[in-house]
Image (cartoon, grey):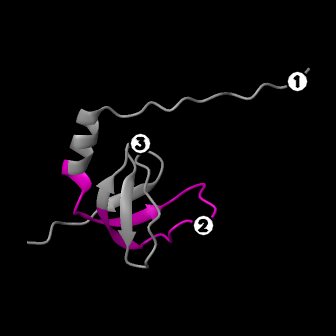
Amino acid sequence: MTKRKEIRYVTLPDPEEIKELEKKFVGRRITLTVMPGDPQPVLPGTQGECVGIDALGQLLMKWDTGSTLNLIPGVDLFNLNEKEE
């Protein structure tokens, strides 16, 4: 008997959810804890700035290392740095 693959559907965030993510993350400094499952992840402890949110709700990042690999909330683990006054 052939084993069937599970099909997973992605639920896109609505415009209000995108706005909330923008308020919370854009312009904030973030420290990565871990990026599981990525074949070429940003290294744990790397810091960067969130520069935007895409239509999937991913955080568009500009890492201090020069990388621009997105963060996926709920998959990647990270911390918001304290706001600089």
Instruction: Name the image quarter holding residue 9.
Output: top right
The image position of residue 64, as x and y in percent, is 37, 78
Residue depicted at 33% across the width and 60% down the height: 79
Question: Which quadrant, please, contains the N terminus?
Answer: top right
Residue depicted at 45% across the width and 30% down the height: 11
Residue depicted at 22% across the width and 42% down the height: 19
CB atoms of marks 3 and 1 within 8 Å: no
Given the image, on which type of amino acid does mark 3 rest?
A: Leu
Disc 1: which residue: 2
Between circles 3 and 1, the one closer to the viewer is 3
CB atoms of marks 2 and 3 within 8 Å: no
Q: Which residues are magenta?
A: 23-50
Q: Farthest residue toward the top?
A: 1
The label number, if any, that marks residue 56 in the structure image = 3
Given the image, on which type of amino acid does mark 1 rest?
A: Thr
N-term mark: 2 or 3 = 2
The image position of residue 35, as x and y in percent, is 51, 59
Is residue 62 a member of the stretch shown in magenta? no
What is the C-alpha distance between the residues marked 2 and 3?
21 Å
17 vs 13, left or right, is left
Label 3 crowding class (10 Å Cα cut-off): few <14, some 14-19, many 20+? Answer: few
Label 2 crowding class (10 Å Cα cut-off): few <14, some 14-19, many 20+? Answer: few
What is the C-alpha distance between the residues marked 2 and 1?
32 Å
N-term mark: 3 or 1 = 1
The label number, if any, that marks residue 40 in the structure image = 2
